[in-house]
Image (cartoon, rainbow, N blue to C red):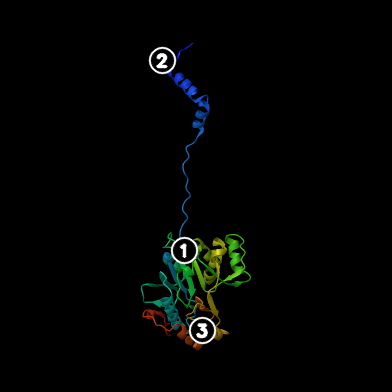
Amino acid sequence: MMTKASKLLNTPGLFVKDAFKNILGGRSKEIINAVNITPTVETITEPPLLKYDNEKLNIHLIVIDTVSDKIKFKESLIRYQYRSIIKYTNFKSLSYISQSIISNNSDISVFKNYSEAFKNKIRNISPKRELFIFIDLNFLFLKKVTNKDFISPAGIPYTFIKNKKRNIDRVKNTFAEHFCEFDYNFSPAEKFCCVDNMQLCHYNNILESVSNPHDYLFEFLPISNTMTKGEQSIIKSPIQFALLDRGYEEKFIWIQSVHGSKRCPLAVTFNKMNDKNDDYAMFLDTIVPHVSRDEHYLSVKQELSH
């Protein structure tokens, strides 16, 4: 029989094992197994959620010229609108898409068409996320606006809806052709669209299949915003509409009565523009009485006489 001394000299490993066994009272195997199977656990932390500082997000304004050059009041309209933009907004930039508007101010760009604006203005911003608001010449701001009037706390551009009614078939067909069936039961606010440059880049090729750029900007893009962002992007339009050919006098009176109060809408827009503009000019004088020192930089190209 091997003594402890000879075991230590001849088989030191066995000696240590037996000693461990005696000290732990038969629990050595359990402890050794436990040590062998216990993994090293590293603490896993979730990535932080993105935080949006909406007040620091750049928003660019692009005005679409939809008014005929034959209307003499057009140049006055441009200046009235410009006054409202200067007084009530603080956008990062102002641009126009027009064949006839001229800008003598280097800070105000004029593009002949949307494709030119996309190539020279919108595409160059990517990949930095910024927003674009599109309006037309018949759109005038009525009160001070900030970024929160156009973006949700989560950084989602609002889609202003005019009312709930049947969907727009030509837009629905465009979705079905390029993506999938998409059902919606609202009409977007006319002459207004707020969308980020990422969506504008993503959908740009679709513009080739849309016959009218106006439909693309003011119908397809607002509706696509709800498809990708969900119902949280939808808000009832804070914009007042008026038809110049009928019923606008009552709306003029109402807007004049609430102008400057909390009941005042964010903006007013007119669905039609014609040469019968005496009441229109009088109304604009009452709600946009101030003159901007820079408004003379904008004008309408005069056609050459034959």
Is residue 15 visible from the viewing direction of this image? yes
Q: Is residue 110 left or right of residue 203?
A: left
Q: CA distance from mark 1 to mark 3?
A: 38 Å
Relative to the observer, which residue lies in front, 284 or 3? 3
Going 49% across and 88% down the picture, which residue do you hit?
A: 278
Residue 83, position in %: x, y? 42, 79
Relative to the observer, which residue lies in front, 113 or 198? 198
List the single residue furthest toward the right.
166
Label 2 CA crowd tier, 10 Å (few <14, some 14–19, many 20+): few
Which residue was labeled with disc 1?
197
List the single residue furthest toward the top.
1
Residue 219, position in %: x, y? 55, 69
Is residue 72 visible from the viewing direction of this image? no
List the single residue furthest toward the bottom.
278
Quadrant occupied by the C terminus? bottom left
Identify the element where label 2 is drawn. helix
- Eye-nearest disc, 1 or 3: 3
- Where residue 130 sits, quadrant-wise, is bottom left
Under mark 2, the amino acid is Leu
Going 51% across and 31% down the picture, which residue do you hit?
A: 34
Label 1 CA crowd tier, 10 Å (few <14, some 14–19, many 20+): many
C-beta proximity under 8 Å, tags 1 and 2: no
Which residue was labeled with disc 2?
9
Which residue was labeled with disc 3?
257
Residue 77, position in %: x, y? 46, 82
Identify the element where label 3 is drawn. helix
Under mark 1, the amino acid is Asn
